[in-house]
Image: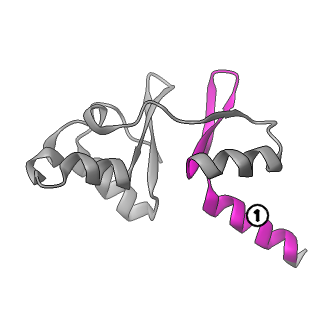
Amino acid sequence: MVVGPNDVLTTAHNRLRNAGFSQLPVIDNDKLVGILTEDTIIRFVFGKPEMMNRSVSDAMETAYIKLDKETSIDNLVALLHVQPYAAVMDDEIFLGLITRSDVLNYLRKKLSS
């Protein structure tokens, strides 16, 4: 699930809520241009609910961790101490977001194997 930079924040929030996610990649012309999180939306609109009618590009984060798809689990865990998610890339191709929750699920599954 993704959102576009010109989508309205209410649309993005509905996608986050309906999917049960805390963050969404912002894609423009098949390129990752930002990440929108529940936290960024809250900070952007707090005290100004009318800001929910603004575009995603106004609230999205453009500074985020990018990591190569070959990054080791050890390095991934270290990076996730800095930020709760990272963009997984294959050169400039966005493959998806990985979160602390994803790592916990992976470790739990390894335990039961």
Element carrying mark 1? helix
Q: Residue at x 44, y 21 (%)?
A: 29
Mark 1 belongs to which amino acid? Tyr
Residue 77, position as x, y percentages in the image: 73, 52
- Viewer can see residue 44: yes
Q: Nearer the viewer, residue 1 or 32?
A: 32
Figure label count = 1
Q: Name the residue furthest right.
A: 113
57 shown above or below 29: below
| Mark 1 crowd level (few <14, some 14–19, many ≥20, 10 Å Cα) | few
Residue 49, position as x, y percentages in the image: 11, 53
For the record, the magenta segment spans 83-111
Task: Say whether residue 66 is left or right of residue 35.
Answer: right
Q: Is residue 39 magenta?
A: no
Q: Quadrant of residue 27?
A: top left
Residue 31, position as x, y percentages in the image: 51, 24
Q: Nearer the viewer, residue 83 or 52?
A: 83
Return the residue at label 1: 106
Q: Is residue 109 magenta?
A: yes
